[in-house]
Image (cartoon, rainbow, N blue to C red):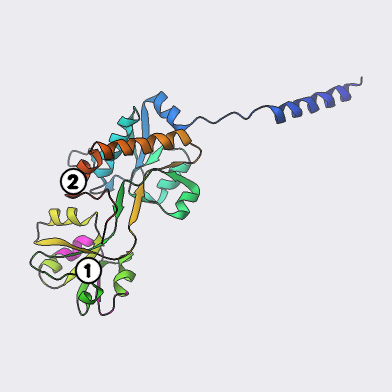
């Protein structure tokens, strides 16, 4: 047999073997985490009260506590990698970390590219008002002729603008409008129900949380790369355990003064 025929037959045999050979299964993230004893976590580290550095430079916050407890349930310790928000999801997809713990909302678009844990915290739009103001803002009619503060560029701007009769006042941040609200220059504000307890506590101003505004709540989960079914089961089981034994509720009350781990009921 000629040399080129031998080469051709060999190539055909190799091709056939490559077709019939089983594909090598990629390692599930759970195996990697258990083998290393480390869960690599991406977060901003500049977002109080969720993840930020305290006066000693140590990372702390609600998300830091939650993912530390999750890692413990998985038999691992967290290793934090601080990353700007603009690049955090790309960093996860590139394998720079295993998960993100940074108030990542679960949306249909994100679910196309990533898998998520079960929701562990829920956000919703909520009114903030003076302690001595008994106005019930659960009805849109209550906003008529009221000066209502919202953060410029936030989702709350179009939300409040859509309420008939409301007078919208925009501010660069939530902190900036608190003194105007306490001083009577505003009637109310609208912001994230997760942030309000922290803002009120930090401000030491006579303010309180008011009514939740109608609308769907936003679910937050822990995202990770697709193709890790065993990790998906394990992280959901970890959250189930933390709900059952009260860990999630305890951490929520520590950071927010209320249980925000259940979907809000307006």
Q: Is residue 186 left or right of residue 222?
A: left
Q: Nearer the viewer, residue 19 or 60?
A: 19
Q: Assess whether residue 263 is covered by the magenta stretch.
A: no
Q: Position of residue 120 (x, y in %)?
A: 31, 45
Crowding around mark 1 (Cα neighbors within 10 Å: few <14, some 14 to 19, many 20+) is some
Q: Nearer the viewer, residue 4 or 188?
A: 188
Write down the quadrant of residue 65 in the picture.
top left
Question: What residue does disc 2 label?
Answer: 253
Q: Position of residue 1 (x, y in %)?
A: 92, 19
Q: Position of residue 157 (x, y in %)?
A: 31, 69
Q: Is residue 240 left or right of residue 24?
A: left
Instruction: For mark 1, give the secondary structure.
Output: loop
Disc 1 or disc 2, which is closer to the eye?
A: 1
Q: Position of residue 142 (x, y in %)?
A: 20, 75
Instruction: For mark 2, give the secondary structure.
Output: helix
Question: What residue does disc 1 label?
Answer: 138
Q: Is residue 12 visible to the viewer in this orientation of the structure?
A: yes
Residue at the outermost right position: 1
At 27% from the left and 56% from the top, the residue drawn is 264
Q: Is residue 52 visible to the viewer in this orientation of the structure?
A: no
How far, Cα to Cα, is label 1 from label 2? 24 Å
Write down the quadrant of residue 136 in the picture.
bottom left
Picture layout, residue 155 above or below residue 2 = below
Crowding around mark 2 (Cα neighbors within 10 Å: few <14, some 14 to 19, many 20+) is some
Picture layout, residue 14 above or below residue 43 = above
Q: Assess whether residue 167 is covered by the magenta stretch.
A: yes
Q: Nearer the viewer, residue 46 or 197?
A: 197
Please provide the residue range marked out in magenta.
162-178
At 37% from the left and 39% from the top, the residue drawn is 236
Picture layout, residue 165 above or below residue 159 = below
């Amino acid at each position: 047999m000629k040399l080129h025929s031998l080469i051709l037959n060999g190539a055909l045999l190799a091709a056939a073997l490559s077709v019939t050979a089983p594909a090598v299964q990629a390692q599930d993230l759970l195996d990697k985490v258990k083998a290393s004893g480390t869960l690599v976590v991406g977060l901003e580290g500049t977002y109080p009260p969720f993840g930020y550095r305290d006066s000693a430079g140590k990372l702390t916050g609600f998300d830091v506590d939650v993912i530390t407890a999750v890692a413990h349930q998985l038999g691992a310790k967290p290793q934090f990698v601080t990353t700007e928000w603009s690049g955090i999801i790309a960093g996860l997809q590139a394998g720079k970390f295993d998960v993100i713990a940074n108030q990542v909302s679960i949306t249909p678009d994100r679910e196309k590219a990533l898998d998520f844990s079960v929701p562990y915290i829920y956000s919703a739009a909520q009114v903030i008002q003076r302690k001595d103001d008994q106005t019930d803002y659960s009805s849109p009619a209550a906003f008529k002729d009221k000066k209502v503060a919202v953060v410029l560029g936030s989702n709350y701007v179009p939300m409040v603008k859509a309420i008939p009769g409301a007078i919208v006042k925009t501010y660069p941040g939530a902190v900036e409008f608190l003194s105007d609200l306490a001083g009577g220059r505003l009637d109310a504000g609208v912001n994230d129900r997760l942030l309000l307890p922290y803002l009120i506590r930090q401000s030491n101003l006579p303010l309180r949380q008011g009514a939740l505004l109608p609308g769907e709540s936003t679910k937050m989960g822990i995202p990770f790369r697709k193709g890790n079914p065993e990790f998906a089961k394990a992280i959901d089981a970890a959250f189930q355990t933390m709900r059952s034994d009260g860990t999630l509720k305890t951490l929520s009350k520590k950071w927010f003064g209320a249980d925000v781990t259940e979907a809000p009921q307006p």
